[in-house]
Amino acid sequence: MTELLKVENLSVRYSNGHQALEDINFSLPKATICALVGANGSGKSTLFKSIMGFVPASQGLVSIAGLPVEEAVRQQRIAYVPQTEQVDWDFPVSVNDVVMMGRYGHMGWLRRPKAADHEAVAVALEKVGMSAFAHRQIGQLSGGQKKRVFVARALAQAAELVLLDEPFTGVDVTSEAQIVELLRTLRDEGCLIVISTHNLGAVPDYCDLSIIIRQHLVAFGPTSDVLTAHNLQSAFGGKLRHHVLQHLGGESSESVTVFTDDERPLVLYPTGQDQSP
Amino acid sequence: MTWLLEPLQFEFMRYALTAMVLAAIPLSLLSCFLVVRGWALMGDALSHAVLPGVVLAYALGLPLLLGAFLAGLFCAAAVGFIDQKTKLKEDTAMGVVFTGLFALGLVLFSVVHSNLHLNHILFGDALGVESEQLWQIGAVTASVIVLMLVFGRDWQLQLFDPIQARTMGLPVGRLHYGLLVILSMSIVSALSTVGIIIAMSLLILPGATLVLMRVSMRKMLWLSPILGSSAALIGGYLSFYLDSAPAPTMVLAMGVQFCLALLAQQYRDYRVPKLKGAP
Ligand SMILES: Nc1ncnc2c1ncn2[C@@H]1O[C@H](COP(=O)(O)OP(=O)(O)O)[C@@H](O)[C@H]1O
Ligand SMILES: [Mg+2]
């Protein structure tokens, strides 16, 4: 198992004195989808930003394929879709132009796109189902469509490590399924994808590994080991809707535990295997 | 055809036209970025802020352009410093630095007894351009064009989405200051020809006209120098026949371009709902 992303003893303290992350340790291999789960304010976005080096770590090390982050960034190894884009929506660029920006790192220093770049952009837009909007100005899209364009740009960048910070906010169920499908293909091509989401019910479907954080690392490992009632309770406290249902049909009085943080609940059966309705 | 050639018989007119076209090109290129980014007033502010540099250079017997350029650089650096080290917004930082420097310039101007013409600094002296100045302006114009060809797309990305620029490992700091440096250079090089106030309108009008025409940034960067330099030519010729000052006449020409674009946009907006409503 070759490690692609390694985070060691990472702590982040904001300038206002708030300790957002404390002593986070994990390492992730290639060809993996890893979920990053935690309540609002648990430090998910901060973790992404500090992996990118946008927020300075007060302590600890992040390395990508053994390289320091700045070097990995220079080699176009990381694509990052932030939770909120700090983008100028009135900027006169089309959807196509935006996705093409993901290709800059692959172009010469004059940044003139070649046939391969146009091809990569068209394929990426096709994959997120946004081809029909290629010539729209970027501000003239809905929230979910904008998100899909930025996912397409991350795809066009052809990075090894893809960081997606809550990419499903504002995205409808069909597009979400489309993006999940896409992540699976990326994984099969050898990418490591780290994705933060509140859609707990879908996590076991496509995430091989999971990380739960709440300032500290609550749990890390294979998804089925990590998303347990105990871990979720310690991560979310009372913030998660949590129902214990009696098995109505069965003779036994076994109970089913249902966790919901978002529209799709996570259902934990007593046997340990989980299913989503 | 004689009307086209007649002004060209005069050397001062040939120089004035060339200088105006050369000065207009870099400023109109940069206007695309400034207008889209909502930094229209930054050009204004920067053009005023070079005044103390000009006055000090005069007092010290240095080339005026050098003084103006150094003042421009100082501004850019001071704004960057305040922006990065404080919570103030960048436009506030610009306002503080630039008005302060302009005020300093005015005070220095009245203290240092000079026979500098404030009018020439403010409004330029296109008809007094000499061949040596033409070379200076030409050099600045050529370097701005080259830099835009090489870094234009990186600047676009940085202005549109600074986080992505960093994600892709672009040297964001150098790009930011580089843009401010070529902005100062272009303003300074235009000062002697068109003056501070006209330089400012060159930094706003072509970009504003193109935003009304709703063209993409890529096309804006092609069209803006065409708008700017055609306005310079039209303004130059008109001024010859109207016996008016060339630089303000050029601004008028850009004003007409802007109004035409505005009319065209209104016409388009008026037609669209009609088309949709048609059976
Ligand atoms: N720029 C900042 N300065 C100070 N505190 C911050 C800043 N950004 C986030 N925080 C705080 O850090 C904590 C983690 O935030 P964040 O990483 O955005 O959480 P999440 O993405 O999991 O919702 C929160 O308590 C938040 O208030
Ligand atoms: Mg977040």
Image (tube, helix red, strand yellow):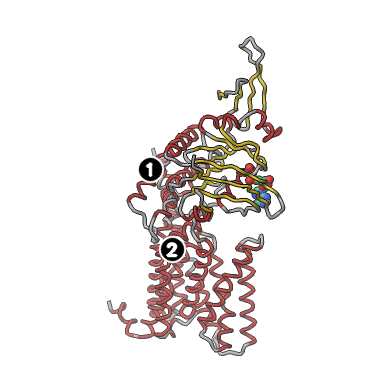
User: According to the image, label 1 marks what residue?
Assistant: A123
Q: CA–CA distance between discs 1 and 2? A: 27 Å
Q: Residues within 10 Å of mark 2 (few under 14, many from 20)?
A: some
Residue B274: % across, % down: 42, 44
Circle 2: element type: helix
Task: Pick whichever, B24 or A49, lies toward us.
Answer: A49
Residue at the farthest top position: A251
Residue at the farthest front position: A1
Q: What residue is at 55 percent from the left and 51 percent from the top?
A: A52
Q: What residue is at 63 percent from the left and 13 percent from the top?
A: A248
| Type of amino acid under label 1 | Val
| Type of amino acid under label 2 | Phe
Task: Tell me how many marks there are.
Answer: 2
Task: Pick whichever, B86 or B17, lies toward us.
Answer: B86
Residue B56: % across, % down: 59, 84
Relative to residue A252, is residue B19 depicted above or below? below
**Whether residue A21 can be seen here:** yes
Task: Pick whichever, A14 or A135, lies toward us.
Answer: A14
**Whether residue A129 can be seen here:** no
- The chain ID associated with circle 2 is B
Residue B83: % across, % down: 62, 63
Look at the image and tell me in which quarter the C terminus of chain A lies: top right
In the visual, does B1 lie left or right of A27?
left
Relative to residue A135, is residue B229 depicted above or below? below
Relative to residue A101, is residue B173 depicted above or below? below
Relative to residue B278, is residue A97 depicted above or below? below
Residue B256: % across, % down: 43, 66
User: According to the image, label 2 marks what residue?
Assistant: B151
